[in-house]
Amino acid sequence: MGESLDGVKGKRVVFVTVGTTCFDALVKVVDSQEVKDELLRRGYTNLLIQMGRGSYLPTKSTGDDGSLAVDYFTFSSSIAEYLKSASLVISHAGSGSIFETMRLGKPLIVVVNEDLMDNHQSELAEELAERKHLYCARPPTLHLTIASMDLKSLVPYSPGDATPVAKLINRFLGFPED
Amino acid sequence: MEKNTSCSFSNLSSNLGISCFIAFIAIILVRVIYVIYGTGKPLSKRSPQQALSTLIVLGSGGHTAEMINLLLVLQKDRFTPRFYIAASTDNMSLQKAHVLENSWADSQSGVKGISAEFMQIYRSREVGQSYVTSVWTTLVATVHALWLMIKIRPQVVLCNGPGTCFPLCVIAFIFKVIGIRWSSIFYVESIARVKKLSLSGLLLYKLQIADQFFVQWPQLQRKYPRAHYVGCLM
């Protein structure tokens, strides 16, 4: 009993999300022994993968033998709950997932999909990585990022503000300023 | 003699036709130049009660989240009625707009009903569709966009990057030229665009269709000086 309680307390979940996309390369790489070993070494206990429209199925594991517990699902209507319970988030480069994770103050590694034709998405991840709000990786280098990351050095993201746009729109249309 | 006059008459009529045509083109050109000149010029002062009908073009996921952040800070009594348009393949975005409108209706219960409408628009080309069939679907999508715009005739157009916004903005611009409706077009480039504009953004900027053009990263403003840098919306 005490053990299971401890287990819940000491649970450190890594949540992987690909959003509504198909990003098998990411699912495959987080399921690789290299990445799983590295996550275990960094003290994580559970790996939960939201795999979207991909076809690659990771190998489930209960983690009883001291290895990483692995579970997956395709979609969920409320990703927020999973994000909240995670200690680390590994996400595709969609702006929705990125900002939702940062708003919750969770450490984030964004993995850029190298197979996308129009790969403007890497722009955002790289810019935010330069500002130290997150780490940016590619599937082949993910294990290196996990090994070398220093989560304390990440800078919390302060949410943006749409009022400057609203002000300019109001001024343009001739509405009085309030 | 008779032959001669009829000949000169037909000459005259063809000349008249050509001059009419040239005059028509000239009028259209002058009008286009006038509209481009007027685009980007702020409107004259108005009272907060003079509400403007507003078209809001929604995109998928991230685009919609940014637009909703903007709508949350706009005065809803000034921008009313509101028409939301999303691609017919995208159900999530209109659902989010519904949730937003319902939350507004709840917060001011008692005041007259919600002034919002939700519409879907055909996409000209789905990802992976062949170019041959996309000629037909583009035609259908254009007619559909025109039909929706004739119904809405918005005074304000708000968009932030989905491909569907480009034909709608072009139609709004044509309405200005023909004099059907003068509208103000606001384009906010998506936060995902850090170094380069999206194709719709680039076209609306270069063709000077957008009255005001906003970017969320300083690098982009340096590249496109007519844009306003407004910081991140997210």
Image (spheres, rainbow, N blue to C red):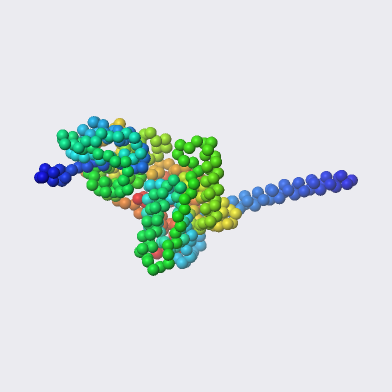
Give whichever of A2, B152 is nearer the camera: A2
Q: Give whichever of A24, B170 is nearer the camera.
A: A24
Residue B61, position as x, y percentages in the image: 38, 47
Q: Which residue occupies the foreground of this view, B126 or A93?
A: B126
- Residue drawn at (47%, 45%) of the image: B163
The spot of residue A141 in percent (x, y) is 29, 32
Asked whether residue A117 appears in the rendered view, the answer is: yes
Q: Residue at x 42, y 64 (%)?
A: B113
Q: Residue furthest bottom?
A: B110
Give above or below for A156 relative to B107.
above
**Residue visible at 55% across and 48% down?**
B143
Q: Position of residue A168 (x, y in %)?
A: 43, 57
x and y percentages locating residue A128 in the rendered image: 32, 43
The part of the image, by quadrant, that contains residue A114 is top left
Q: How many numbered circles does the render carry?
A: 0
Q: Is residue A130 visible?
A: no
Residue sitting farthest toward the right: B1
Camera-side residue of B159 and A68: A68
Give the left or right position of residue B181, taking residue A104 as reference. Answer: right
Q: What residue sits 31% from the left and 46% below the top? A: A76
As drawn, is B54 to the left or to the right of A77? Answer: right
